[in-house]
Image (cartoon, helix red, strand yellow):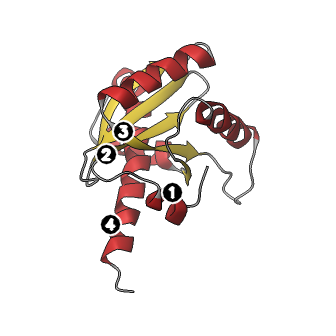
Amino acid sequence: METLPDWTESLPSGAGIIGLDLGTKTIGVAVSDRLRISATPRLTIRRTKFTKDAQDLLKIIREDQIGGIVLGFPVNMDGSEGPRAQATRAFARNFGKLTDLPILLWDERLSTAAVERMLIEADSSRAQRAEVVDKLAAAYILQGVLDRLKNLADRPD
C-alpha cells in the first residue's frame, strides 16, 4: 500500500491498472487500457473465500497484463476509518502477499452513490442497477485515479 507518487513510480510502462470496489458480498472489477486513459467495467465477482477471490483476481491480472492495483478505500465522510476501511486494509495486506504489484488505496467516498444516481437518471430498474453497480463503482474509482495521474503528468514542474 503506497502513496500516489510512490505507487505511480512503481508502475511498469505499458501495463494496465485494475480497480476494485470491495463489498462484503461482491468485488466490482474494472480495468484500464494500457495507455491508462479510460477505465472499463469488467465484471462483478461474488465473494466466497479470500483464497478463491484472490485466485479469480490474479487470473484477471495475468490475462489483462495489469501492472498496478487500485482498491477503493471506504473512509467515513469525516475521514475516519471504520470497519469497512479496516477490512479493505486487511484485504490489501493479504493480497499483497500474493503479488508484487503495487497497491494503492483510493478514497472512494460517494462512488457507489454517484453510480447509483447515474443509473437512476438512465432509468435503470432496481434489478439492472444491482447487477452492474459494483463493476461501475470500480470503474468510477479507477477513472478517478487515471484522471489524477493525467493531471499530475500535465502539470508543469
Q: Earlier in the sequence, mark 1 or mark 4?
A: 1
Determine whether the residue tagged by mark 1 lies in a helix, strand or loop.
Answer: helix
Determine whether the residue tagged by mark 4 lies in a helix, strand or loop.
Answer: helix
User: Three-letter amino acid code at disc 3?
Assistant: Ile
Mark 1, residues whose alpha carbon is within 10 Å: few (<14), some, or many (≥20)?
Answer: some
For disc 1, the marked residue is 7
Is label 4 in contact with label 2 (beta carbons under 8 Å)? Answer: no
Q: Earlier in the sequence, mark 4 or mark 2?
A: 2
- Nearest to the eye among marks 4 and 3: give it: 3
For disc 3, the marked residue is 66
Determine whether the residue tagged by mark 2 lies in a helix, strand or loop.
Answer: loop
Residue 83 image offset from top left, x and y in percent = 75, 38
- Nearest to the eye among marks 4 and 2: give it: 2
Residue 108 image offset from top left, x and y in percent = 54, 50
**Front residue of this view, candidates 94 and 75:** 94
Q: Alpha carbon of mark 4 to alpha carbon of mark 3: how far?
A: 18 Å
Image quadrant of residue 51?
top right
**Front residue of this view, candidates 7 and 147:** 7
For disc 4, the marked residue is 150
Residue name at image x 59 percent, y 31 percent: 95
Image quadrant of residue 43?
top left
Residue name at image x 43 percent, y 41 percent: 19
User: Three-letter amino acid code at disc 2?
Assistant: Ala
Mark 3, residues whose alpha carbon is within 10 Å: few (<14), some, or many (≥20)?
Answer: many
Does residue 57 sit above or below 9 in this rendering? Answer: above
Q: Alpha carbon of mark 1 to alpha carbon of mark 4: how far?
A: 14 Å
Q: Alpha carbon of mark 4 to alpha carbon of mark 2: how far?
A: 15 Å
60 relative to 123 in the view: left or right = right
Mark 2, residues whose alpha carbon is within 10 Å: few (<14), some, or many (≥20)?
Answer: some
